Image: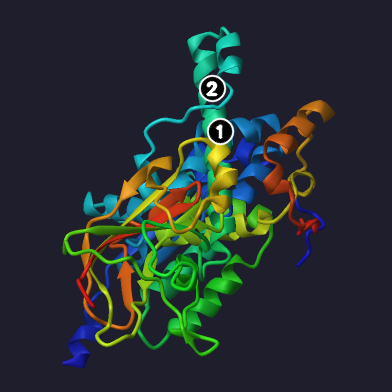
Amino acid sequence: MDFGVETRVDFVLCLENDVSLNILLHLNDPADVVCASAVSHLWHQFVVTNEIAKQLCLRKFPQLSRIARITEPDLRVAERKDVESSNSSWETLKRDHNVYASLLQAIETSNSCPSDCIGNAVSASSTDHFPDESIVNTLVSRDRYQNIPSYWSSIGHSDPNAQETLIYKLKTDLCVITEINIQPFEGRPICSAKSVRFRFGHPKSSRDKSDLLHWPQEQPVDDKFIWTYTSEEFPMRQVQLLTLLFPNTGDVICQNCLFTGISHWRRHE
Amino acid sequence: MASTTETKQKKMLILKSADNDEFEIEESVGVQSETIKNLVEDGFTFVPLPNVYTKALIKIIDYLKKHANKTDSNDEEIKTFDKDFVNTTFDDLFELVSAANYLHISCLMNMLCQTIADRIKDKSPEAVRKIFHINCDYTPEEEAKIRKANAQAFEGQFDESLD
């Protein structure tokens, strides 16, 4: 191709607005949208006022349309600036552009290792024969580890409606959960729970976040967390591997890294 | 009966470009454009297109003819045609995308926008400026601020080529 005599106009300046918008909406990568916004003042204004980062974000993850409010950690900055309303709506657009672009980048980075998002075991509400039957065993997919049966077991309850809770820390601060697999231990009979539900959340204080892995694994710590999402209750069959898919586009985006399975256990000896 | 369908008169349209060239095409080919379709529905057979120049119109008529004959068997052929179609300069792409927008041909519009977007994908802001002859109107301080606010976007390797 001969590019020698090309004029190559600044298309954001020269083409109709809806055409330029259509072109930039075809950038699929949030990093490209950010780069486009850094080309010139005009491009920046165009990308920000047309909310391209937000549109891209919502197209890829429609569940993010439920974001009701964006708050900034540093409120002093917002208060100090006594700006006019027209100016502040520009400031809002600019902030939203940064938020959606970095949110999308964070999600995509975490999705680049999609296979397994559970990082560590945090705690179980009860454990029989600690540490032999501790929650850590659930991170190994095999039923036996070095020839010893590998599973977690609760202390058991006489009440069939008793609940047990397992808490895990996820690998990254931001995860998109599309599927959860549970593998009951293959004893005789298969010791699965009667039903199971999931919650996602984060520690109540940021101090707890760093302490997370130092808590005693055999004790309940449920009250130290704020749960932001609770799933419906899934009945469990006595099968070897149960896969739960989150329906439609209802994938759960989990912020700040905690995941818990709560189950009503079948009684078994 | 094949002979009657063949002899049956095909409805034709005349398209007139911005530089006053006239092109005769089958109506069934033309109505892939929403703009032309609306005019045809209003009874027009002569369609002036004051926003579309001859050079772009010839290419677009080619595209419409090819896509009007879409069947299950020529899928690959059309893909090859499309690939050649967009393998052109930015100037041509901008001319075509404006025309496709005016004519409301959504599949062509999508293809052209995706092509242009793909060509600026992975490029640094500096490379995009060079490609489109855009003056950097940011002060070095402003630029540093943008980089800092979006550090993650500037972490990767950029494609600095200018084509």
Read off the chain for label 2.
A
Task: Please name the residue shown 32% across and 67% down the image.
Answer: A245
Residues marked 1 and 2 touching at CB (< 8 Å)? yes
Task: Please name the residue shown 54% across and 15% down the image.
Answer: A87
User: Toward which corner of the image does residue A123 lie, by quadrant?
Assistant: bottom left
> Position of A13 compared to B124: left or right?
left
Residue A8: x and y, percent?
Answer: 72, 48
Residue B40: x and y, percent?
Answer: 27, 55
Depth check: give the residue in front, B84 or A103.
Answer: A103
Q: Quadrant of the C terminus of chain A?
A: bottom left
Q: Amino acid type of disc 2?
A: Trp
Which residue carries the number 1 mark?
A48
Task: Please name the residue shown 60% across and 51% down the image.
Answer: B94
Kind of element beneath mark 1: helix
Q: Amino acid type of disc 1?
A: Val
Q: Earlier in the sequence, mark 1 or mark 2?
A: 1
Which residue carries the number 2 mark?
A90
Depth check: give the residue in front, A49 or B106.
Answer: A49
Task: Please name the residue shown 67% across and 54% down the image.
Answer: B120
Outermost residue on the front side: it is A129
Residue A220: x and y, percent?
Answer: 39, 51
| Picture layout, residue A263 above or below residue B82 | above
Query: How dense is the environment of label 2, judged by Cα within 10 Å: few (below 14), some, or many (20 and up)?
Result: some
| Picture layout, residue A149 above or below residue A111 | below
